[in-house]
């Protein structure tokens, strides 16, 4: 009986660990596969307009809603700090295009064109 319980326990631990590793790899792989990462909020019209722009131009991207995804929020903030971009007056969306990080702090049309470059 103890053997069955122990085997079940270890099987559950193995399945849980495998699931966690797959989730972490999926998050990393999304960042590698997609050239453009958009950090934004579903309550921000600039963010929604950016997604629409990317969709209309058939530009592949990954979108993270930083209001709902704390891990993505922290990742975005770390990237901004690493590039010495101030977070005190942050305007979203924030774009990571092949490691080139920029924010919506210019004329919006110019911002969209910068993504397309």
Image (cartoon, rainbow, N blue to C red):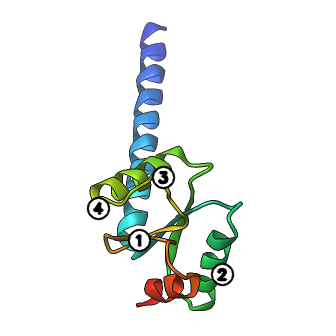
Q: Where 12 falls versus 62 (above or below)?
A: above
Q: Secondary structure at mark 3?
A: helix
Q: Nearer the viewer, residue 78 or 104?
A: 104
Q: Is residue 43 left or right of residue 93?
A: right
Q: Residue at x 31, y 70 (%)?
A: 99
Q: Secondary structure at mark 4?
A: loop
Q: Which residue is mark 3?
A: 72
The image shows residue 79 at horizontal and vertical percentages of 35, 57
Check if mark 3's residue and mark 1's residue have beta carbons within 8 Å. Answer: no
Q: Nearer the viewer, mark 3 or mark 1?
A: 1
Alpha-carbon distance for marks 1 and 4? 9 Å
Q: Nearer the viewer, residue 103 or 50?
A: 103
Alpha-carbon distance for marks 1 and 2? 18 Å
Quick one: label 1 or label 4, which is nearer the N terminus?
A: 4
Q: Quadrant of the C terminus?
A: bottom left
Alpha-carbon distance for marks 3 and 1? 16 Å
Q: Is residue 110 left or right of residue 98?
A: right
Alpha-carbon distance for marks 2 and 3? 21 Å
Q: What is the number of the mark on residue 52?
A: 2
Q: Residue at x 36, y 58 (%)?
A: 80
Q: Which residue is mark 4?
A: 83
The image shows residue 114 at horizontal and vertical percentages of 44, 85
Check if mark 3's residue and mark 4's residue have beta carbons within 8 Å. Answer: no
Q: Nearer the viewer, residue 64 or 50?
A: 50
């Amino acid at each position: 009986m103890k053997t069955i319980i122990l085997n079940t326990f270890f099987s559950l631990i193995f399945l849980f660990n495998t699931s966690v590793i797959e989730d972490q790899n999926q998050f990393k792989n999304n960042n590698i596969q997609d050239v453009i990462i958009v950090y934004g909020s579903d309550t921000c019209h600039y963010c929604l307009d950016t997604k629409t722009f990317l969709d209309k131009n058939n530009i592949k991207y990954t979108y993270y809603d930083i209001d709902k995804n704390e891990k993505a929020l922290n990742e975005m903030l770390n990237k901004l700090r690493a590039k010495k971009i101030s977070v005190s007056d942050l305007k979203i969306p924030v774009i990571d295009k092949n490691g080139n990080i920029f924010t919506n702090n210019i004329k919006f049309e110019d911002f969209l064109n910068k993504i397309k470059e």
